[in-house]
Amino acid sequence: MANVTFSSPIMHQDKTVYAIAGNTKTVLGLAEEHNIPIPFECQNGNCGSCLIEVEYYSPESKMSLALTEKEKSKLKELGKLTAAEIEAAEVNDMPPRWRLACQFVARAEDVRIIFSGEPGGAV
């Protein structure tokens, strides 16, 4: 069970939604369900248009699903993921702050999702 707060300069105010435990819907799917305007194109991790920044309200208990190979590749290409961050994610189970909304699944942690509103735009 997670509270997911969406924040963007294109929204009038932040919006918090509840993600049901065990739901494997991505943050992009959750945003679509609640009419939150995260831009996207491909929905499968190839284009990078749904770039988000993830803030954990309890950083000591990060629990997100691992980075997919597509996500690693695209985030590296966008300059948002370093080799050290990949190692931390794979070895220490510490997910990076930059993710793709179409790949990221919030689990049992409360998070803030920040997006610019521009496809592939910097947050």
Image: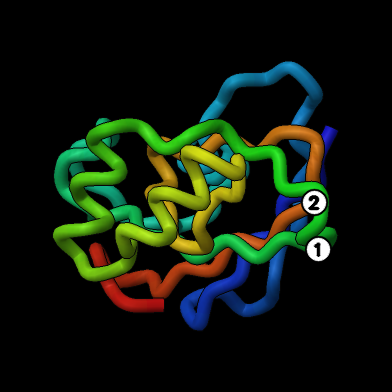
The secondary structure type at the circle numbered 2 is loop
Q: Where is the N terminus found, in terms of image quarters? A: top right
Residue 91 drawn above or below residue 117: above
Q: Amino acid at mark 1?
A: Tyr
Q: In which quadrant of the rendered view does residue 78 lie? A: bottom left
Q: Is residue 45 left or right of residue 28?
A: left
Left/right placement of residue 14 relative to residue 100 reads right
| Residues marked 2 and 1 touching at CB (< 8 Å) | yes
> Looking at the image, which is closer to me, 116 or 54?
54
Q: Tell me what residue is drawn at x 42 percent, y 37 percent.
A: 67
Q: In this figure, which residue is indicated by the disc labeled 2?
A: 110
Question: What is the number of callouts on the image?
Answer: 2
- Compare residues 25 and 72 and report the one nearer the observer: 72
Q: Quadrant of the C terminus?
A: bottom left
Residue located 69% across and 71% down the image: 14
Give the residue pinned by disc 1: 57
Pick whichever of labels 2 and 1 is earlier in the sequence: 1
Which structural element holds mark 1? loop
Query: Crowding at label 1, few (<14), some or many (≥20) Cα neighbours within 10 Å?
Result: few
Please name the residue shown 33% across and 62% down the image. 81
Q: Residue at x 61, y 70 (%)?
A: 7
Q: In which image quadrant can residue 21 be found?
A: top right
Residue 44 percent location from the top left of the image? 26, 31
Residue 43, horizontal then vertical, whole percent = 28, 35
**The quarter of the displayed image where residue 68 is located:** top left
Name the one closer to the observer, 64 or 118.
64
